[in-house]
Amino acid sequence: MLRQGDVFDNPITGERATVRLGTRETKGERLVVDLELRGAGFGSDLHLHPAIHERLTVVSGHVGICVNGAISIAKLGKTIDIPPGVAHRFWNAGICEAKLTIDIRPAKRFEAFIRNMIGLAQDGKTDPRGMPNLLQLAVIANEFDDVIHFLKPPRFMQRALFPILAPMARMRGYRGSYSEYAFRVPSERVQNESKMP
């Protein structure tokens, strides 16, 4: 489980996440990270969480955000609540690094998903948008359907195509979750000076 001070880097998306409050401390109920978006850094493609509440707070820089099709630039101090089922994505919209704090509830399954996505990116198994190939996506989408729904390809296409692709993907060695990513050590560990409640 993630613990306070763990740091994970996604070399493809330009994200660096430092855990402020981990799933270890909250028994999987909550995850709070300080997220740096370097350069043209960005979060996941347009997606929604069926049962996760996400709260983003801009700490520095300018963060572009799309929530339910409405695009805006969130400036310093802005907090955006994203309830379950709401499509969203975010990116660095400035010329300098942007920092935000992300609070996710519940977080246990989200942690498993994000560890897999970061591991794939670190191992060079994603495209420039941080997304895996279609076969890998088919088994990840199936494994983590309770956590995240990507909106590309469209959901109707995913429902028709992924059940056909998933068995082929498994035959080729793709899995929905990789134990080596679940237990991969953080990029580094830091001592957090501030503690979240």
Image (tube, rainbow, N blue to C red):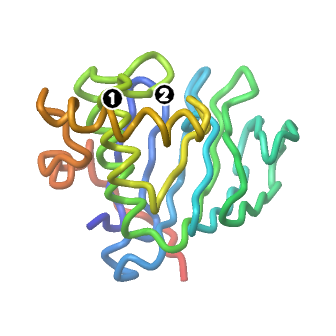
166 lies left or right of 85: left
Dots 2 and 1: beta carbons under 8 Å?
yes
Q: Which one is nearer the viewer's eye here, 132 or 58? A: 132
Please state, as top left, top right, bottom left or bottom right, where the N terminus lies in the image.
Answer: bottom left
Q: Which one is nearer the viewer's eye here, 36 or 135? A: 135
Task: Identify the residue position indicated by label 2 in the image.
Answer: 13
Task: Identify the residue position indicated by label 1 in the image.
Answer: 121
Task: Please provide percent x and percent y for residue 83.
Answer: 71, 66
Task: Give SS at disc 1.
Answer: helix
Please state, as top left, top right, bottom left or bottom right, where the C terminus lies in the image.
Answer: bottom right
Q: Quadrant of residue 11?
A: top left
Q: Mark 1, residues whose alpha carbon is within 10 Å: few (<14), some, or many (≥20)?
A: many
Q: Mark 2, residues whose alpha carbon is within 10 Å: few (<14), some, or many (≥20)?
A: many
Name the kind of residue labelled 1 in the image.
Answer: Ala
Task: Give SS at disc 2.
Answer: loop
Name the kind of residue labelled 2 in the image.
Answer: Thr
18 lies left or right of 152: left
Q: Which one is nearer the viewer's eye here, 17 or 188? A: 17
122 lies left or right of 47: left
180 lies left or right of 186: left
- Outermost residue, top direction? 128
